[in-house]
Image (tube, grey):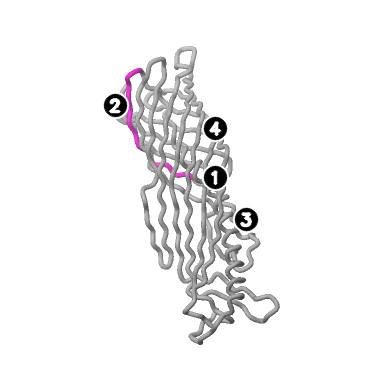
């Protein structure tokens, strides 16, 4: 797109049409983003929540782990959006979006074979700058857990079985700004004129509040200093993901820029969290020092969602 210092007056009707079309495109892209984050956020917030060994009464433990979930993004869906001005085919996007989290927990042993705990974690506010792009993300995760040992290992019981009930809340946001972009041009119907945008800035904001109630079943076996485990979990999720995209810049008529006027278009969307997450769980823990355990965990929820975790915990009783 060429730009010129030539003075130009753009009819308001042209600006209104261009703004409307650009807002429509922004709404389509925003809708695509919420349709992806509805899977990313609840799955990430409930990942990494496996502690295989049961606490005895009045026992306690504390631990911390790093978790990374990866959600497959519908890149073809983005590139095939029916936009009028913005060419989504030129937008680069992760094929699988990584989402990290640091998670801490504390648990205590209760009577009747129960133990209970709390989880706190997420991502503190983080800012990233790269050329004309700026991004910031933050996410807070809080969870409660209640577990019961159903089967204890023994001579005739080669595996232990633990059932767990958990609740998780996630609250966060994502902001992304890209300057010096050209959203494209809009041909005014019935004329030979086109309106484009110079000095364009695209700003995106997403925020979410989600809740999840989950049920978990874990089979585990102590073999010397290693405890392998395998299991499954199901989570029912609720809550909303909101997104808005704002495009601003100086309008140009046939390439002649009006630097005294600002064109601004906003598109927004809201979607509900993916209702169900079902996943397979597998991993093992190593006793590296008395009372100290190092754990490795993998989670698989079909091709859409996967996660891995590395954790360290100290357990007494």
* Closer-to-camera residue (56/36): 36
Q: Nearer the viewer, mark 1 or mark 2?
A: 1
Near mark 4 (Cα within 10 A), the count class, few <14, some 14-19 or many ≥20, is some
Q: What is the residue that sits farthest to the front in this orientation?
A: 12
Q: CA distance from mark 2 to mark 4?
A: 33 Å
Disc 1, SS: helix
Asked whether the beta carbons under mark 3 and mark 2 sit within 8 Å of each other, the answer is: no
Residue interval drawn in magenta: 57-69
**CB within 8 Å, label 4 to label 1:** no
Image coords of residue 305 (percent x, y): 54, 43
Q: Quadrant of the N terminus?
A: bottom right
At x 41%, y 15%, the residue is 112
Gap in angstroms between the C-alphas marked 1 and 2: 39 Å
x, y percentage for residue 198? 50, 75
* Residue at the disc numbered 2: 290
Tags 3 and 1 touching, CB below 8 Å: no
The residue where tag 1 is placed is 39
Principal SS element in the magenta part?
strand
Between circles 2 and 4, the one closer to the viewer is: 4
Image quadrant occupied by the C terminus: top left
Residue on which disc 3 sits: 77
Packing grade of label 1 (10 A; few <14, some 14-19, many >=20) is: many
Q: CA distance from mark 4 to mark 1?
A: 14 Å
- How far apart are the two marked residues, 3 and 4, measured between alpha carbons? 27 Å
Of the image marks 3 and 1, the number of the one nearer the N terminus: 1
Mark sitting earlier along the chain (3/4): 3
| Residue lying at 62% horizontally and 71% vertically, measured from the top left | 17
Give the number of callouts: 4
Task: Tell me which numbered mark, 3 or 2, is placed earlier along the sequence.
Answer: 3
First in sequence, mark 2 or 4: give its number. 4
Numbered tag placed on residue 234 in the rendering: 4
């Amino acid at each position: 797109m060429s730009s010129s210092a030539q003075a130009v007056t753009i009819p308001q009707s042209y600006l209104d049409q261009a703004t409307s079309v650009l807002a429509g495109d922004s709404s389509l892209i925003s809708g695509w983003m919420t349709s992806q984050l509805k899977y990313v956020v609840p799955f990430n917030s409930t990942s990494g929540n496996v502690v295989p060994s049961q606490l005895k009464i009045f026992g306690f433990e504390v631990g911390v782990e790093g978790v990374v979930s990866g959600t497959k993004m519908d890149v073809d869906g983005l590139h095939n959006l029916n936009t009028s001005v913005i060419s989504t085919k030129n937008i680069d996007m992760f094929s699988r979006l990584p989402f990290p989290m640091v998670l801490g927990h504390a648990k205590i042993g209760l009577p009747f074979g129960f133990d209970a705990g709390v989880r706190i974690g997420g991502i503190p506010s983080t800012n990233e700058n790269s050329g004309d792009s700026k991004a910031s993300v933050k996410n807070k995760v809080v969870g409660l857990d209640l577990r019961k040992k159903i089967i204890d290992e023994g001579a005739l019981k080669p595996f232990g079985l633990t059932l767990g009930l958990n609740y998780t809340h996630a609250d966060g946001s994502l902001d992304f700004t890209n300057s010096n972009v050209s959203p494209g041009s809009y041909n005014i119907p019935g004329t030979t004129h086109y309106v484009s945008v110079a000095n364009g800035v695209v700003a995106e904001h997403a925020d979410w509040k989600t809740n999840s109630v989950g049920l978990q079943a874990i089979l585990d076996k102590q073999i010397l200093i290693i405890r392998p485990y395998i299991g499954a979990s199901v989570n029912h999720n609720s809550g909303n993901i909101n997104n808005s995209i704002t495009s601003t810049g100086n309008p140009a008529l046939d390439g002649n820029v009006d630097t005294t006027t600002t064109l601004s278009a906003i598109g927004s969307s809201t979607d509900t969290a993916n209702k169900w997450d079902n996943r397979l769980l597998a991993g093992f823990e190593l006793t590296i020092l008395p009372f100290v355990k190092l754990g490795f965990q993998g989670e698989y929820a079909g091709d859409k969602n996967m996660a891995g975790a590395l954790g360290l915990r100290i357990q007494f009783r």
